[in-house]
Image (cartoon, rainbow, N blue to C red):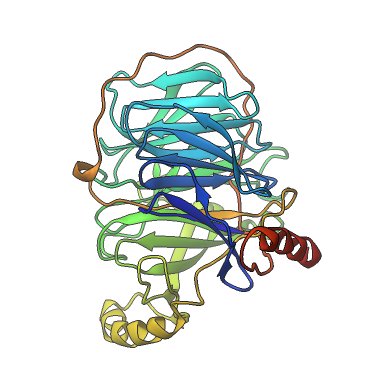
Amino acid sequence: MLATGSDDKTIRLWALPSGRPHPIPLIGHHNYIYSLSFSPKGNILVSGSFDEAVYLWDVRSARIMRTLPAHSDPVRGVDFNRDGTLLVSCSSDGLIRIWDTMTGQCLRTLVHEDRRQVSSVRFSPNSRYIVAWTLDERIRLWDYGLGKCVKTYQGHSNKSYSLTGTVAAYEPSASSGPSGTDHAFLLSGSEDGSIWAWDVESKDILWTSGAGVHTGPIFEVEVMRWNHDDPDEHGNILMISAGEDRKIRLWRGKVEKDKRKTHSGVNGIGPTGLNEETIVGGLTGIDGVNGLKDTENDDDDDDDDESDDDEESDEEEDSSDEEPNQEPEGPNTQTVPHRSANQTDRPQVENEDEPQDQDQPMLDVTTEPEPGPEPTNQTEDHDAFLDQVEEAL
């Protein structure tokens, strides 16, 4: 499944195999849709908007389950935990809030003393922590059970755009590390067009691509494949980055133990030898994808090929929008949130009241894309769409 949010205040679901939209858009927000996330089972969608609210949607019925008056400024990021029992939201008001998915109760509010605008938020893979991007060029790791920030990462540029990334966990084989241990690193884009990786524990910079791998800010970086079962002392990584230049770049690399020197000269475990191999270019916003091509980090080739990419994207624009299935029990769903570029375009509201304090166990992970069928046209078509999804699964 795929979900997209738009400036027209609607959310649309798309069936990935066919690229056709579900006949019924999700309508309820009163301003731009800014962030989206599927629950792990794919049956619930959470949305954040410039109207300062968080909505929970029943994907099967395409109806609102719950409305949360979450913040006093635009909601910039939302995410579910691993079992879907908790969700997190963040806002320009500087607050990060953890919610009970079923009751809609705010369990805890996290506020840094600087109260910087929070532009994006993610649960860690083990669900024990929350990673938050702020517009002071910092990424903070929160232990939300304790209600405090435990790590701060910096080096990237981030003052105006909503950037996000991911935490990747590497579990070494018996030959590469102690049994039961794992190693994690944080990936993020930067406004100067570079990608950064930090060791989560030590905060060391493990790797950076250098500026200019994208022209302009890199909005999102994701790990698309992580090989935990590699028999050697490393695993393979497929990383994807998306930027304001309307390009999606794929990167391949490895994770190695002790054999690699990090950016700061520290031995350890992390991404190394990341090389750009392919580009999905010619995107019109998020509307069209014209295919893959090989590259060797050659900026000149990128420029020469852009005109060809644009011609191809015009032909594929209508059919390449990804769509979601509304299978409540199908994990693997992906969302493409609307991203406004500049901070100044966003409405400002008053200060938010301070947190409610409650400890809650930590559980969450990121979600992934799920295949699905094709929709049709209106009320009865909604049921037909769901039937097709179930048959496809």
Residue 221 pos. (x, y %): 44, 55
Q: Could you tell me which quadrant the N terminus lies in?
A: bottom right
In the displayed structure, 156 sits above or below 306; it is above
Along the line of sight, the residue nearer the viewer: 380 or 250: 380
Along the line of sight, the residue nearer the viewer: 50 or 213: 50
Q: Could you tell me which quadrant the C terminus lies in?
A: bottom right
Q: Residue at x 31, y 57 (%)?
A: 194
Residue furthest to the right in view is 391
Residue furthest to the left in view is 344
The answer to whether residue 115 of the structure is visible from this angle is yes
Q: Residue at x 33, y 82 (%)?
A: 310
Along the line of sight, the residue nearer the viewer: 129 or 306: 306
The answer to whether residue 120 of the structure is visible from this angle is no
Residue 201 pos. (x, y %): 49, 34
Along the line of sight, the residue nearer the viewer: 68 or 291: 68
Query: How many numbered marks, from 0 up?
Result: 0
Q: Quadrant of residue 136?
A: top left
Residue 199 pos. (x, y %): 46, 41
Q: Residue at x 32, y 31 (%)?
A: 73
In the displayed structure, 135 sits above or below 260; it is above
Residue 107 pos. (x, y %): 55, 18
